[in-house]
C-alpha cells in the first residue's frame, strides 16, 4: 500500500476513536455512491453529521486547500444521496477533521460547508 494511503487509514482510525470518545454514534464509514465517498456518517445527538477526514504530515495546511469547491459540492451531493437512499428526513451537518503534523494532532471544525 502506498504511504499516503497508509497515512490516510491511520488518520481515519484516529478520527474514529475521537468521534466515539466525543459521544458520536458512527453509522457508516467510507460510504460510497459512484465516485463520491463520505468518510464518516454519524449521529451527534439527533443531528446527522457527515465528517470529512484529511490527514497530512505537514501541519501548515490551509482549510481552503483541503476543501475546494469541487470537494465541497461532492460532499453535498453524496450527503443528499445518502439521505435519499436511506430514506432519512432530517438536517445534515458537514464537519471536517484535520489530522496533521508529526504528532498527528486532531483539529475538528464543525459546519465546514457554511464557512465558505
Image: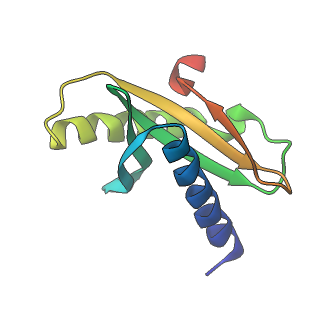
Q: Is residue 59 above or below residue 44?
A: below
Give the percent coordinates (x, y) of residue 3.
Answer: 70, 74
Which is nearer the eye, 92 or 37?
Answer: 92
Above or below 87: residue 5: below
Farthest residue toward the left? 87
64 with respect to 113 (left or right): right
| Image: 14 above or below 6 | above
Q: Position of residue 74 (x, y in %)?
A: 43, 40
- Residue 107 pos. (x, y %): 70, 37
* Residue at the image point whose x is 47% and y is 30% from the top: 94
Corner quadrant of residue 96:
top right
Residue depicted at 28% across the width and 34% down the height: 80
Q: How many marks?
A: 0
Nearer to me, 9 or 80: 9
> Residue at image x 18%, y 37%?
84
* Residue 66 seen in the current view: yes
Tell me: residue 78, above or below residue 33.
above
* Image location (x, y in percent) of residue 14: 62, 56
Looking at the image, residue 9 sits to the left or right of residue 28; the answer is: right
Drawn side of residue 33 relative to residue 112, left or right: left
Q: Which sits in the foreground, 79 or 69?
A: 79
Image quarter (top left, top right, bottom left or bottom right) of the C terminus: top right
Describe the colour scheme in one phrase.
rainbow
**Quarter of the image that includes the N terminus:** bottom right
**Can residue 116 be seen in this snapshot?**
no
The residue positioned 18% from the left and 25% from the top of the image is 89
Amino acid at each position: 500500500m502506498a504511504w499516503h494511503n497508509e497515512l490516510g487509514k491511520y488518520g481515519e482510525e484516529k478520527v474514529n476513536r475521537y468521534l466515539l470518545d466525543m459521544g458520536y454514534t458512527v453509522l457508516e464509514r467510507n460510504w460510497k455512491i459512484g465516485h463520491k465517498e463520505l468518510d464518516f456518517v454519524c449521529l451527534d445527538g439527533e443531528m446527522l453529521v457527515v465528517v470529512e477526514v484529511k490527514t497530512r504530515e505537514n501541519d501548515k495546511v490551509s482549510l481552503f486547500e483541503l476543501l475546494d469547491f469541487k470537494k465541497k459540492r461532492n460532499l453535498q451531493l453524496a450527503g443528499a444521496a445518502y439521505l435519499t437512499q436511506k430514506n432519512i428526513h432530517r438536517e445534515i451537518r458537514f464537519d471536517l477533521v484535520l489530522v496533521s503534523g508529526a504528532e498527528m494532532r486532531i483539529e475538528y471544525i464543525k459546519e465546514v460547508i457554511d464557512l465558505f
